[in-house]
Image: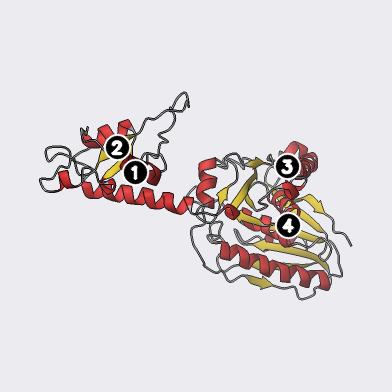
Amino acid sequence: MSNTYIPKSVQHEVWWKAAGRCEFKGCNKPLYKHGVTLDECKISELAHIIGDSENGPRGDKKLSKVLAKDPKNIMLMCPECHKYIDNEGKEKYTAEMLFDMKKRHEDRIARLTALGEDLQAHAVTYGSKIGNHQPDFSFPQIQDALLPDFYPVNDMPIDLGGNWPTAKEWDEFWRREVENLEYNCKDKILDKIDRWEYKRIALFGFAPMPLLVKLGTMLNNKHEVVVYQKQRSGGWKWLQEKIHTDYIINRPENPRLKPVLVLSLSFPIAERIKKHNPNASIWEMTIDTPNPEFLKSKQQLYDFGRQIELLLDDITKASNDQPLDLYLSVPVACAIEFGRVWMQKANSPLRIYDLDKQVDNIDKLAVTIENKK
């Protein structure tokens, strides 16, 4: 440990550039409160990168005295990390590595604290366990997904609930879940949003497709909503900046029959749907190789929404406003976005089906959404 007196001005500079957190990579521990009791206290230490003595950790005959009081050579650390780099880890962590840690930490703090107030977003979660897959709506994952574009208003997301259906109560499940979703969305968001200073919503969904579409119709394009997609990597952060997908539209030969829309983006399901709807006009949106991991960028989701807007308009005109039967095999963000672009006054009513794998792999009617014509 150092015996050099470090001026208060240098201490203050090191502290505020580190935002009061340990600068050792992967630690980031807040150094202004006790880790167990959460009582306010100062547990920070000032760690020299190049030791203030040539005989100390990472010491240098020429530089040690010159840099002993230089804030660029001092890291803010918790006691554990400071002790580690000066003892057991002193051979593993070179001065170059520690300088890099300090720079990365302080650059990140500078970026985050530069975010304006108008970039706040209310994180909203809706979902349930699907099979063996449990969604992770933890605050660190949500915060990681938002940054650096936005940051959360609060450290507790608005939870809209959500459950998964069982074969014994199919119809009752959907009725109950739609009622709960409508109530929670109205009570927690729609009745309050006019009083929010910042009205942007960051939406994280992981639930049965019909309910995600329903949610999208409530948090529609009248509201500023940023929809996120769960990635295979485990997080919610978009993996690509701007990549495009060529969506393929297959139109029926006779568009005047009962309209059916099939979205085959995650898996090809059109043939199964055609077998159960032999006397219908089958419209399909698909991609070259349907797969559940194709959605990696906000641009792909935006393009999907624009294509759906045009397609719904074509179907509504061709079918003379008949109710539209909807079958989906899409990433969850696409299901939400479908609901958001569906226009309650302009488009056909929706009859949304879901595959009941618990009862002979049958697609059954799950949710009906009326329009206002």
Whole-percent x, y for residue 352 in the image: 76, 54
**What secondary structure is found at the residue carrying circle 3?**
helix
Residue drawn at the location 31% of the way across and 31% of the way down: 80
Residue that badge 2 annotates: 46
Disc 4 residue type (three-letter): Asn
- Spatial CA distance of label 3 from label 4 is 16 Å
- Spatial CA distance of label 4 from label 2 is 51 Å
Q: Is residue 329 left or right of residue 324?
A: left
Q: Could you tell which of marks 3 and 4 lies nearer the N-terminus?
A: 3
**What secondary structure is found at the residue carrying circle 1?**
helix
Q: How many marks?
A: 4
Q: Which mark is residue 14?
A: 1
**Front tag of 3 and 2:** 2
- Spatial CA distance of label 3 from label 2 is 45 Å
- Spatial CA distance of label 4 from label 1 is 46 Å
**Front tag of 4 and 2:** 2
Residue that extends furthest to the right in the rendered view of this protein: 373
Q: Would you say the residues marked 3 and 4 are in contact, meaning their CB atoms lie under 8 Å apart? A: no
Quadrant containing the N terminus is top left
